[in-house]
Image (tube, rainbow, N blue to C red):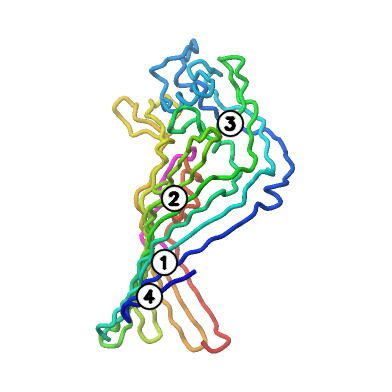
Amino acid sequence: MKLGWRPAESLLIRGTWGTAFRAPNLRELFLSGSTGFLNVSDPCYLPEEALNNLTGEYIPENDQRDPLVLSNCRATGVDPTKANNGGFNTFSVEAEAGGALDLDPEESESWTVGFAYEQNFTNKFKLSFGVTYYEIDITNTVIEPSTGFIVRDCYTDEAGDGSSAFCSRITRDLASPENPQITFMDLGFINRDQEIARGVDYNMSFNDQLNWGAPIDVSFNLNATRLIERSTQFTSPSGTVDYEEYAGEWGFPEWQVQGALRFKWDRWTLTWETRFLDGVKQDAEAIDEFDSISGGSDTCLGPPADVLCRDYAEANSYFRHSTSLFYKADTFILGAGIRNVFNKQPPRVDGSEVISFSNTPIGFGYDLQGRTFFLDAVYLLGET
């Protein structure tokens, strides 16, 4: 459903509302269960840096694990100060994946409200801009959790009482306090209770003609997005709510902006484009405690005493600039340009914390090629 109202010729106030429905597909419902063995890192086992190198005894002051992790381990029946495998906490665990007949259909509701304004007080230039607020609410999203997701959600849950909805998908052999290994994990499809995305979109367009000895058309376009909320929510069988907020974290920068400035004279067009990505950080629950240089962390801030070490996965704001010049004739188009004019490098991160290749995050919008030059040639077969 769409609604629009013009209180003035130059101003449009608009809004939309819609719903969607998706039933679970055949794979999600009837995929035959299959098992296999996957490597799982168990945070409830003593880390290597917390053990004496000679005797293997536990040294509490060297244990840099998050207190939340320790609390969740205890709540699920594991004493994290006794579970000991000599500092090696990665195990081969049997895991089962398959369909689930009790899945509910996905449903969503979305709405937007905003305005668009186009100036009409002068003919010397054209100016228009708009602002739109959006909200998308999805319930019962069908997901297939991974082993890493299940372990992280269970043992870094902020409640600290083992009440994460995913702890029930982990089975342990608790017969021995020193060796409470994970024996089985359920990776079957499940409904996510709620998923919400909220934000504001901005856009602006400006056009004018300048006379610098010859008429030159100037245009500027700007598109920006401000992410307010990107969250998920699960409710455990006991009714405990497991809420996760992703805005400002990897893959969900709070601000994304793209602008383009163009100068057009006769058959020539010069363009300058800029893209901005806001800084991002790790989920607060996943940030490692500072450790010494002899521990398991890969990144250190340096002296004093080499004790400011932890796996690093944050990125500052990122700008990328590109430019091009094109000539359009009656039957062909020629162009050349530079992508990433200032050779802006992507941030460097720890590969154990963020999806990356050679410590470079991939799939997050950063330019991986550096400064590149290009040439374009197009032959026109018909009228344009």
Please name the amino acid that badge 1 sits on: Ile
- Tell whether 190 sits left or right of 262: right
Q: Nearer the viewer, mark 1 or mark 2?
A: 2
Magenta region includes residue 63: no
Residue at the spot of label 2: 230
Whichever of callouts 4 and 1 sits on the residue coming sooner in the sequence is 4
User: 10 Å neighbourhood of mark 4: few (<14), some, or many (≥20)?
Assistant: few
Q: Secondary structure at mark 3?
A: helix
Q: Nearer the viewer, mark 2 or mark 3?
A: 3
Residue 329 vs 238, above or below: the answer is below
- What distance separates the C-alpha of mark 1 from that of mark 3? 53 Å
Please name the amino acid that badge 2 sits on: Arg
User: Residue placed at 56% from the left, 60% from the top?
Assistant: 20
Residue at the spot of label 3: 168
Q: Nearer the viewer, mark 1 or mark 3?
A: 3
Viewer-closest of 84 and 30: 30
Whichever of callouts 4 and 3 sits on the residue coming sooner in the sequence is 4
Give the numbered dot on residue 338: 1
- What distance separates the C-alpha of mark 4 from that of mark 1? 44 Å
Residue at the spot of label 4: 5
Q: Position of residue 352 (x, y in %)?
A: 49, 37
Q: Secondary structure at mark 4?
A: strand
